[in-house]
Image (cartoon, rainbow, N blue to C red):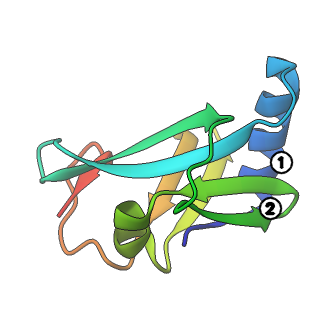
Amino acid sequence: MIALTEKAATKVSQLIEAEGEEGLALRVAVRPGGCSGFSYDMFFDTEIADDDLTSDDNGVRVVVDPSSAMLLDGATLDYSDGLNQAGFSINNPNAQRTCGCGSSFS
């Protein structure tokens, strides 16, 4: 399962609050594609399947489907708002190779 840093959890909480919808969770998934074989997908979701894995990380409910969970085990979602780089990034110890854009891995 993926963990959220405090900065990432704070930003996700702000984004969920701005959506104004009850019961939103952050869904993190791994999809086939991207220049390295797999790409990350993140979005807010209210539909939780029976086999989804859920956790509460720094006040944010995180949902991952079982096949993505295997590829995200030990990964960390971080957020940066610096001048050089802004946005979310995933540090995944399971990734053997990543592309230059940081959005796909193998």
> What is the quadrant of residue 67 in the picture?
bottom left
Quadrant into which the N terminus falls:
bottom right
Answer with left or right where residue 12 lies relative to residue 58: left
Outermost residue toward the front in this view = 50
Residue 103: x %, y % from top left:
32, 45
Q: Is residue 67 visible?
A: yes
Q: Is residue 65 above or below residue 74?
A: above
Q: State the mark number for residue 26.
A: none
Q: Using the image, determine if residue 52 lies above or below residue 103.
A: below
Q: Nearer the viewer, residue 36 or 28?
A: 28
Quarter residue 92 falls in: bottom left
Image quadrant holding the C terminus, namely bottom left
**Residue lying at 67% horizontally and 56% vertically, measured from the top left:** 62
Q: Residue at x 77, y 41 (%)?
A: 11
Asked if 30 appears above or below 34 in the picture, the reply is below
Q: x%, y% of residue 25?
A: 71, 43
Q: Residue at x 62, y 47 (%)?
A: 48
Q: Is residue 16 left or right of residue 106?
A: right
Q: Which residue is mark 1?
A: 10
What is the CA distance from the residue labelled 1 to the residue labelled 2? 6 Å
Front-lying residue, 84 or 74: 74
At a point 22% along the width and 60% down the height, the residue shown is 98
Residue 9: percent from the left, percent from the top?
77, 53
Which SS class for mark 1? helix
Task: Indicate whether 5 appears above or below 24.
Answer: below
Find residue 64 and report its horizontal and vertical position in percent: 52, 58
Q: Looking at the picture, which amino acid does disc 1 mark?
A: Thr
Q: At numbered mark 2, what does the secondary structure look like: helix, strand or loop?
A: helix
- Are the residues tagged 1 and 2 within 8 Å (C-beta)? yes
The kind of residue on which mark 2 rests is Glu
Mark 1, Cα crowd under 10 Å, few <14 / some 14-19 / many 20+, is: some
Give the residue at mark 2. Answer: 6
